[in-house]
Image (tube, helix red, strand yellow):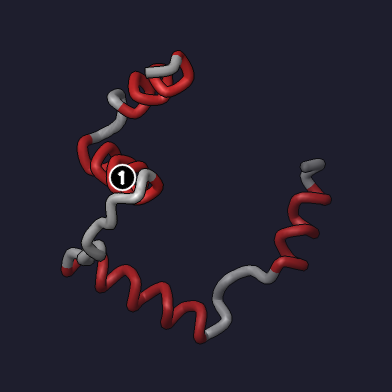
Amino acid sequence: MTRLFDQAVEKVAQLPDEEQDALARVLLQLAGQEQPPYLLTPEEEVELDASIAAEARGEFATDEEIRAIRAKHGR
C-alpha cells in the first residue's frame, strides 16, 4: 500500500461507519467492482422529496445570488 493510500485509509477510519461504507463503495467501484444501487432510507426519501419540491418552488439561491453573497463577504 502506498503512503498516500495509507493516509487516506487512516483519515477515513476516523469517520462514522455510514460515511466509511459510502467511501468504500466508491473506492470499490473505481477499482472495477460494481456496487449495488444505494437504497434510500424512508427518512432520506422524505428529505429528497422535500428538496425536489423546494427546488420546483424556486427556493434555492441562484448562481448569481451566491456570487453576490460571496462578493459581499469577500470570498
| Pick the front one: 30 or 45 | 30
Total numbered circles: 1
| Amino acid found under the numbered disc labelled 1 | Leu
Residue 40 in percent (x, y) is at 22, 66
Position of residue 51 relative to residue 5, above or below, is below
For disc 1, the neighbor class at 10 Å (few under 14, some 14 to 19, many from 20) is: few
Q: Quadrant of residue 48?
A: bottom left
- Residue 53 is left or right of residue 36, and the answer is right
- Residue 29 is left or right of residue 71, and the answer is left
Position of residue 45 relative to residue 29, above or below, is below
Residue 28 in percent (x, y) is at 31, 45
- Residue 33 is left or right of residue 61, and the answer is left
Residue 12 in percent (x, y) is at 34, 28
Q: Residue at x 30, y 24 (%)?
A: 14
Most distant residue in the top direction: 3
| Pick the front one: 14 or 9 | 9
| Pick the front one: 29 or 41 | 29
- Residue 17 is left or right of residue 53, and the answer is left
Q: Residue at x 41, y 73 (%)?
A: 51
Circle 1 residue: 28
Q: Residue at x 43, y 17 (%)?
A: 2
Q: Quadrant of residue 16?
A: top left
Q: Residue at x 71, y 60 (%)?
A: 66
Assign the C terminus to one quadrant of the image.
Answer: top right
Label 1 SS: helix
